[in-house]
Amino acid sequence: MTTQRYRALRCLFSLLAPLLIASRTVAAIDEVGQPAPALVVKQLDGRDLDLASLRGKVVVLNFWATWCPPCRAEMPMLEAFYQKHQSEGVTVIGLSADDPHERKVVSRAILGLTYPAALLVDAKANGFGTPRALPITYIIGPDGIIRARLLPTKQGLTEQDLASAVTPLVPQDAESITRKE
């Protein structure tokens, strides 16, 4: 199969996947309520990222790919959300499902983004496995528990969707953390 044909099929899949998933009832959210699995990966900037080291923060873990138009469309919103909420202990991680030979394309795609990004194939430990659809976003609470899995829909992930999943997990201040414990 030629590279051009392969990319066309991947693009077609990325356009159809949200429609297929949206047409099914999402009953298999077995990860929600469970501890986040291990994820240790070398970021595109060369630094190591260990999900376990982010305990205490709300983590928005977004699986995406350069060949996925819905993925690319939500990246500016994810960046804006990260900029707006990182001071509240929220971090965003972009994990690209692109092939290793696409590293330069991935690096160009994240230019201007300030949240950490890595290639899925660079993971030393990846308990999340290979995503069944893209984009897919996991919301992990400060306690390390997966609190939501946001699947692709026709309209794509919105800031309102993200805020609805993240805001309840962000402590308002240090006193509220003490009162909860």
Image (cartoon, helix red, strand yellow):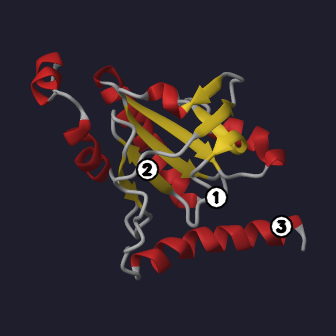
Which residue was labeled with disc 2?
Answer: 138
Residue 157 visible within the image = no
User: What is the distance, in whole Å, between disc 2 and disc 3 at their CAs?
Assistant: 31 Å
Q: Residue at x 71, y 51 (%)?
A: 98
Callout 1, which amino acid?
Thr
User: What is the distance, in whole Å, between disc 1 and disc 2 at their CAs?
Assistant: 13 Å
- The quadrant of the rendering that contains the C terminus is top left
Which residue was labeled with disc 1?
Answer: 130
Look at the numbered discs 1 and 2 and tell me whether their residues touch, using CB distance below 8 Å: no
Q: Residue at x 26, y 44 (%)?
A: 163
Q: Secondary structure at mark 1?
A: loop
Residue 96 visible within the image = yes
Q: Earlier in the sequence, mark 1 or mark 2?
A: 1
Q: Residue at x 39, y 58 (%)?
A: 150
Within 10 Å of the Cα at label 2, are there few (<14), some (14-19), or many (20+) other Cα atoms?
A: many
Q: Secondary structure at mark 3?
A: helix
Could you tell me residue 129's position as x and y percent? 62, 55
Q: Earlier in the sequence, mark 2 or mark 3?
A: 3
Q: Earlier in the sequence, mark 1 or mark 3?
A: 3
Which residue was labeled with disc 3?
Answer: 4
Observer-nearest of 138 and 4: 138
Within 10 Å of the Cα at label 3, are there few (<14), some (14-19), or many (20+) other Cα atoms?
A: few
Q: Name the front one of labels 1 and 3.
A: 1
Q: Is residue 140 left or right of residue 49?
A: left
Callout 2, which amino acid?
Tyr
Q: Residue at x 55, y 76 (%)?
A: 16
